[in-house]
Amino acid sequence: MKLVTAIVQDKDTTKLSNAFVKADIRATRLTTSGGFLRSGNTTFLIAIEDERVQTVLDTIQTVSKKRKQYMVPPVGLDAGGEHGGIYPVEVEVGGATVYTQSIESFHQF
C-alpha cells in the first residue's frame, strides 16, 4: 500500500476531486497555501493499493495543468535595495507536486 501526497493549485482542485470520484479513488483534501507565491493550493492524501498508484498519478497529471501568471516579487527579494523599480514578473504555476511513500500499516476505525 502507498500514500500519495499531491499538492495542486486551487484552480485544479474541483476538477481533480471529480476525477478521483469518477475513478473510485478516495482522497482526503486539505486546504494549504504555498510559501513563495503565497497562493492557495490543496493537498490530497491518498492511501491506495500498489497496483493502482499509476492510475492516481495519471489522473493527477491529466487534470493538473501548468499556467503562467504575473506576480510582484516580495520586497526582500529585490537585490538592488531600491523598492521603486519592482515590476511584476511572469512565473509558471500549477501542475502538481506529488510524493509517493510506502505505508507500513493502514487502519480504519
Image (cartoon, rainbow, N blue to C red):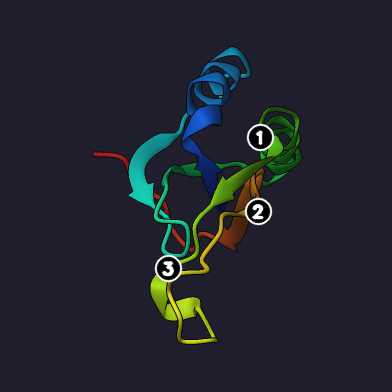
Q: Position of residue 94 (x, y in %)?
A: 62, 43
- Residue at horizontal 50%, vertical 79%? 78
- Residue at horizontal 73%, vertical 37%? 61
Secondary element at image label 1? loop
Residue toward you, 87 or 3: 87
The residue beneath circle 2 is 91
Residue 88 lies in what quarter of the image?
Answer: bottom right
In space, the residues marked 1 and 3 are separated at their CA atoms by 26 Å
The residue beneath circle 3 is 74
**Which mark sits nearer the N-terminus, 3 or 2?**
3
Q: How would you rate the neighbour count of disc 1 (Cα within 10 Å): few for under 14, some for 14-19, many for 20 or more?
A: many
The residue beneath circle 1 is 64
Label 2 sits on what residue type? Val
Label 1 sits on what residue type? Ser
Say above or below: 90 vs 41: below
Nearer the observer: mark 2 or 1; the answer is 2
**Which mark sits nearer the N-terminus, 2 or 1?**
1
- Residue at horizontal 45%, vertical 33%? 27
In space, the residues marked 2 and 1 are separated at their CA atoms by 16 Å
- Residue at horizontal 53%, vertical 16%? 18
Q: Is residue 65 left or right of residue 80?
A: right
Nearer the observer: mark 1 or 3; the answer is 3
Looking at this rendering, what residue extends furthest in the left direction? 109
Image quadrant in which the C terminus is located: top left
Say above or below: 87 vs 70: below
Q: Is residue 97 left or right of residue 5?
A: right
Q: Position of residue 80 (x, y in %)?
A: 54, 86
